[in-house]
Image: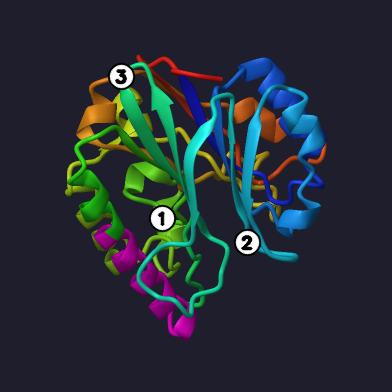
Amino acid sequence: MRIATWNVNSIKQRMDQLVAWITERSPDIVCLQETKCVDEAFPREPLESLGYNVAAHGQKAFNGVAVLSKFRFDEVTPRLPGEESDDHARFMEAVISTGSGSLRLASLYLPNGNPPATDKYAYKIAWMDRLIQYAQERLSLEEPLILAGDFNVIPTTADARNPDRWTSDALFLPRTREKFRALCNLGFTDAVRAACEGPGPFTFWDYQAGAWQKNEGIRIDHLLLSPQATDQLIAAGVDKHVRSWEKPSDHVPVWIELGLSGASR
């Protein structure tokens, strides 16, 4: 089973690229972020015609997450628990059946947090605390669990081409990295880092200052696997070449292959 995550930076603007990449990579499940689209306007038809079931949780003009699956959804739950007043469309959990039992995954778009000396950073840290609490509860189920998405976290110096340029950024502050380590230390495996030695691979190149041309990238898109999912890990990778396509997202897809098969389509 191939599972991928991609911050598409507007589903409507990037549909042609998404279809082209899906045709090339043939993922079974895709977690999307920054769809920037209300649910009623989500362009389901092109994706359903490719054989996907579509679950979307969005809002107008910004944020938004979705899950595409070639297998039927058993459950779909939007919103990260822990704060009822948080109306940002940043999280969606989905459960599907596999030949080995349930697979639970979450498509998440963690807050950016910049500028650090503002409420935006406090919101980021609080969101990460809620994610840690959610993960603790889900890990107790002892089933394959995948946290997939744009975490807006540069975990280590190996995850930035020029780490010194990010020292004052919310993505790389010590407290941000500490929270990410706390999450991983619950028992998650960073799939890409397990498969690839640093520095890199990178998953994001800013549109500004020729970052792509200079390969001034960072790795902020992650697939974190519970022990039960890690046991099934076969391969992981980053489709860097997608960033060179016409009108690209500033992020690229990240994918894993697991030794699981879907129970029903």
Give the residues in magenta: 116-133
Mark 2, Cα crowd under 10 Å, few <14 / some 14-19 / many 20+, is many
Q: What residue is drawn where x is 32% and y is 66%?
A: 130
- Say whether residue 120 is magenta: yes
Q: Which of marks 2 and 1 is nearer the N terminus?
A: 2
Q: Which of marks 3 and 1 is nearer the N terminus?
A: 3
Identify the main secondary structure in magenta.
helix
Picture coordinates of residue 229, whole percent (x, y): 29, 28
List x then y, in percent, for residue 57: 61, 55
Tell me if residue 94 comes above or below residue 125 in the rendering: above
Q: Nearer the viewer, residue 247 or 141?
A: 141
For residue 187: magenta? no
Image quadrant where one finds the N terminus: top left
Task: Pick whichever, 252 or 20, lies toward us.
Answer: 20
Q: Which of marks 3 and 1 is in front?
A: 3
Q: Which amino acid does label 1 sit on?
A: Val
Residue beneath disc 1: 153
**Res. 243 image quadrant:** top right
Report the front residue among 205 and 26.
Answer: 26
> Circle 2 sits in a helix, a strand or a loop, which is it?
loop
Q: Is any atom of residue 167 visible in this view?
A: yes
